[in-house]
Image (cartoon, grey):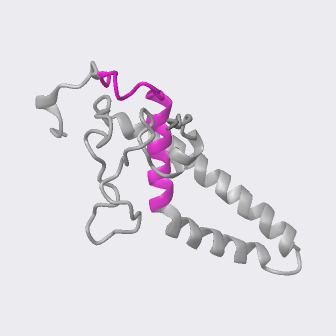
Amino acid sequence: METVKKGKPSYVLSVLGNKCPRCREGYLFESKNAYALKQSRYIKMHDHCPACGQRTEIEVGFYYGTSYVSYALTVAYSVATFVAWWVLFGFSIEDNSIFYWLGVNSISLLLLQPLFMRLSRTLWLSWFVKYDPEWQRNEAAKPERIIESQMGNW
């Protein structure tokens, strides 16, 4: 019987699936549903990856940088909807079509905010924690700038 060797999991699919960048198997967020707003779990992340044990917050205030990533994502989304609107409907000086686009874009940005937030956190973490094909054998790196007794004090 042959053993099938698993290939390297896709970076893009693991980021879009909100999976750990080290093993690309464990989910970073406690809830898979980005719109579980009543339970306030849509934003809650595991402290460690359930699959490989990688810490998800590698220093105090680590996720402050995600605001820049989220900003870039929303600007890219707005540019894409602007171009799509221009191609499909067009813009003119004689009508108010730009205001219709602004309304549609604003509402869609509000509705997509939980997805953008999760995506920006996953992307941010993936830029600092690299994929380890031998993650089952290698221990997860211990963050040097984390003091367990000081976590959550702010």
Q: Quadrant of residue 140?
A: top left
Residue occupying the point 47% across, 27% down: 133
Q: Is residue 85 left or right of residue 110?
A: right
State which region is magenta: 114-141
Q: Nearer the viewer, residue 51 or 108?
A: 51
**Which residue sits furthest front?**
1
Q: Nearer the viewer, residue 125 or 17?
A: 17
**Which residue sits furthest bottom?**
95
Q: Is residue 38 left or right of residue 70?
A: left
Residue occupying the point 42% across, 35% down: 23
Q: Is residue 154 left or right of residue 74?
A: left
**Total tally of numbered discs in the picture:** 0
Q: Is residue 149 left or right of residue 16?
A: left
Quarter of the image that includes the C terminus? top left
Q: Position of residue 16 (x, y in %)?
A: 53, 51
**Which residue sits furthest top?**
144
Q: Position of residue 107 (x, y in %)?
A: 57, 73
Queried whether the magenta region covers residue 113, the answer comes back as no
Residue occupying the point 17% across, 25% down: 147
Queried whether the magenta region covers residue 138, the answer comes back as yes
Residue occupying the point 34% across, 21% down: 138
**Which residue sits furthest left?**
149
Q: Nearer the viewer, residue 26 or 75?
A: 26
Where 115 sits versus 73, above or below?
A: below
Where 9 sits versus 79, above or below?
A: above
